[in-house]
Amino acid sequence: MSRGVLVDLTKCIGCGSCTVACKMYNANQWIDDRAATNGERAELADENWTVIQKFRVPQKVAVTDQVPETADKANREIWRFVKRQCMHCKEPGCVSSCFAKAFQKTEAGPVIYYPDNCVGCRYCMLACPFKIPKFEWDKTIPVITKCVMCSNRIAKGQQPACVSVCPTNVMKFGDRDDLLAEAKELVRNDSRYVQHIYGEEEAGGTSWIYVSDTPFAQLGFKMDVPKKPIPSYTSTYMHSTPIFGAIWALILTGLYFFTKRKEQVKTKEHVEMVKKDSSQTTE
């Protein structure tokens, strides 16, 4: 049974409880000096696995007797808050691009990361259509970081930390298929919602799915994500990566020995030349 989370953006008030819970559960540091976790400047980073982004959305207000035609009422702004984290694709591009098996998809849904397996190639960052994996550029021994959907909690039958603390029930954790069916019913029966469930088809489908009353394009969602699973684009090439890696290693080894042999010959010729000059001087 693959688990997932349904996010109803109409309920989010931007309190940031989920970002705090994520920090505390994963023991991540606060890095507000370069990447905020909440607000219009919020962005995912090596220590920010969950953020709440704030958007000012223009809203037309119908002019009636109760709402006279004034500039401040005929054209108003509303705030919308969007929770960001790894989307946990059903068929993850990061997993298919990682020949070191540092990324692995579990049967329960989360895409988890094993830093001890990572070789630092950063192919995962290129393969992810949502630009989720981040690199620890400031660390002496850097690794990749991202949300792992609290896989340890899910394994124990618990909700992800962010879901468990939300005061307005923005997120619902459960079976992904059941959540998708609920989202479809919600969108079909409530005219407030846009006719799009983000994550239903993007990148072949994701474990995190969103419903909204505001077009997703206005909320910073990537709209150019292909519907086809990312591994279908990369699998053919990535199967050959270890082979090319081995070939490249042999080439480098050959160049090393060739260069070393060349230096040895050069040194030998220099020594012989010095001996010859020395003998001629003695004579």
Image (tube, helix red, strand yellow):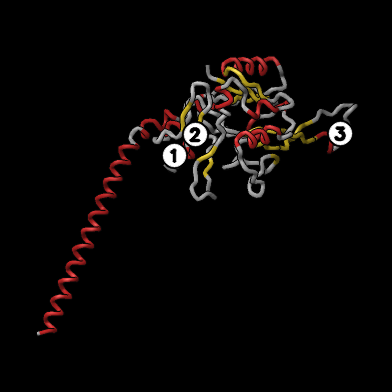
Where is residue 19 shown, x and y percent of the image? 66, 35
Q: Are marks 1 and 3 in contact (CB under 8 Å)?
A: no
Which quadrant holds residue 85?
top right
Say whether disc 1 or disc 3 marks the residue closer to the N-terminus. Answer: 3
Quadrant occupied by the C terminus: bottom left
Which residue reaches farthest left?
283
At 64% from the left edge and 29% from the top edge, which residue is drawn?
161
Inspect this view and state whether residue 218 appears: no
Residue under pointer 3: 69
Mark 1 Cα shell of 10 Å, populated few (<14), some (14-19), many (≥20): some
Which residue reaches farthest right?
65
Q: Which mark is residue 118?
A: 1
Which quadrant holds residue 213?
top right
Would residue 39 appear left or right of 98 to someone viewing this image?
right
Say whether disc 2 or disc 3 marks the residue closer to the N-terminus. Answer: 3
Q: Nearer the viewer, residue 266 or 117?
A: 117
Residue under pointer 2: 113
Say which amino acid is labelled 1: Cys
Q: For marks 2 and 1, give the CA distance.
A: 9 Å
Numbered disc 1: secondary structure: loop
Mark 2 Cα shell of 10 Å, populated few (<14), some (14-19), many (≥20): many
Q: Are marks 2 and 1 in contact (CB under 8 Å)?
A: yes
In the image, residue 138 sits, relative to residue 68, either above or below, namely below
Q: For marks 1 and 3, give the CA distance.
A: 60 Å
In the image, residue 105 sits, relative to residue 28, either above or below, namely above
Where is residue 184 shown, x and y percent of the image? 63, 17
Would residue 42 appear left or right of 273 to someone viewing this image?
right
Say which amino acid is labelled 2: Tyr
Mark 3 Cα shell of 10 Å, populated few (<14), some (14-19), many (≥20): some
Say which amino acid is labelled 3: Glu
In the image, residue 3 sits, relative to residue 131, either above or below, namely above
